[in-house]
Amino acid sequence: WIELNDNDVSGEPTACRVCGGPVRRCLDLGRQPVSNAFLLPEQIADEAFFRLEVGICTRCTLVQQLDVVAHERMFRPDYPYRSSTSARLRRHFADVARTLHTTELTGPDDLVVEVGSNDGIMLRTLSDAGVRHLGVDPCVGAGDTAAQGGVRIRIDYFNERSAAEIRRTDGPAKVIFSANTISHIADLGSVFGGVDALLTADGVFVFEDRYLADIIAHTTFDQIYDEHVYLLAVRSVSEVAAVFGFELIDAQRLGVHGGSMRYTVARAGARPRTARVDQLIGEERALGLGDPATFAGFGARLDVIGKDLVALLTELRSAGMRVAGYGATSKSATVTNYCGIGTDLVPVIYDTTPEKQGRLTPGAHIPVESAARFTDPYPDYALLFAWNHAEEIIEREREFRDRGGRWILYVPDVHLL
Ligand code: TYD
Ligand code: ZN
């Protein structure tokens, strides 16, 4: 295997990737693989690992990984994640598209550019409505699916270079949208540089991401993995935007992915700032989100979850119970590798994504099989790694419980459903 960093920064403060302020180390999730690098057996020997550690900038409060995995290793042409596997997400992004269409993309020729458009889950709706659009995503497989759905795609990373080219060929964008991608990009200067090159004078940069306050409140430590270089919050996004000459003008809480936030950013002074922004920043201060001590409590809670989960799985397996995982999520990489859960405790994970099936999960090397095989025969217990889709999955697989099966959930604590 390959070690991606020999990151020994013990005791040494590192500098914030955005403001240069001192970063306090607050969480160590150990040796972790690239979370979406599902493997063929012959690839095990070359598997790459890195040390997953999180710190907080004591100046701008940006929560960030101390060392990051290179983009090219994470977002490869065969990147297997597909947004459209979830019906709830399909509804969510159709709503996003309709809202952008009625509030911002009101001119006949307005252009929208999406950063990290994946399989076209959001742009599909705007394309159908005849809106000028372009999706930018480095992952060919997902991009092909988007293109088949009628979405215009540029296979590329979004940065100053690609943004300037898009401006030359397509003109400025009224809206730049992104979901669950901005936190993946370590060089936020390149993101805002790209936005600066491409956005109209009065346009908006709207992005959604998992919300730090929800991660802390529900101890969803599995939201921390290689791709989530930043765990964003209203205060930190507001600070980051200001560093690059922009302003956070609105923020709105969302239920998806276990709790997210939609940030609306404009050029500084271009649009009025809603009262909601300062209200949320006040709430975050009351929660201690900018305080390194908050993470000590979080770390202690996640250790309890990890121990409880391993104890339960060990007990079930020694009682001869059949246990399976459900949802080969990126999140499951953190859980299995942090807790040391391998095939002895969870012999298989079922998942609907064809690109993941027939492969082994990163680090833990648990085989992924088609979700269609979940029924044949049902396990006694199913560990729900895709807990953010719990409602949808438990409803679809209701026969599992009808026949006496039980779901195991591990957030906000280990419990059975
Ligand atoms: P998700 O939780 O959205 O993402 P992440 O990788 O960011 O943690 O991933 C959901 C995974 O679960 C994905 O691999 C598809 C799978 N899945 C199912 O197998 N069945 C389902 O009904 C749904 C909604 C998802
Ligand atoms: Zn900072």
Image (cartoon, grey):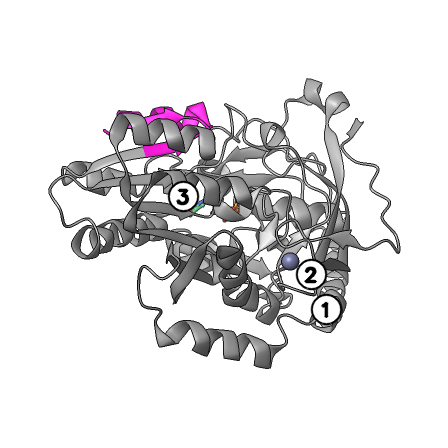
Question: Of residues 28 and 416, which is closer to you in this image?
Answer: 28
Image x and y of residue 265, in percent: 39, 57
Up-down: is 82 above or below 214? above
Instruction: Note whether residue 158 is visible.
Output: no
Q: Residue at 63% across / 33% down in the picture?
A: 367
- Whether the magenta-drawn stretch holds residue 75 is answered as no
| In the image: residue 415, left or right of residue 293 | left
Which disc number belongs to residue 56?
2
Q: Residues within 10 Å of mark 1 (few under 14, many from 20)?
A: many
Up-down: is 164 above or below 256? above
Image x and y of residue 156, in percent: 44, 26
Range covered by the magenta-colored residues: 135-157
CB under 8 Å between discs 1 and 2: yes
Residue type at tag 1 = Pro
Which disc number belongs to residue 292?
1
Q: Residue at 63% across / 76% down in the picture?
A: 288
Residue on which disc 3 sits: 196
Q: Residue at 51% across / 24% down in the picture?
A: 78
Q: Of marks 1 and 2, which one's residue comes earlier in the chain?
A: 2
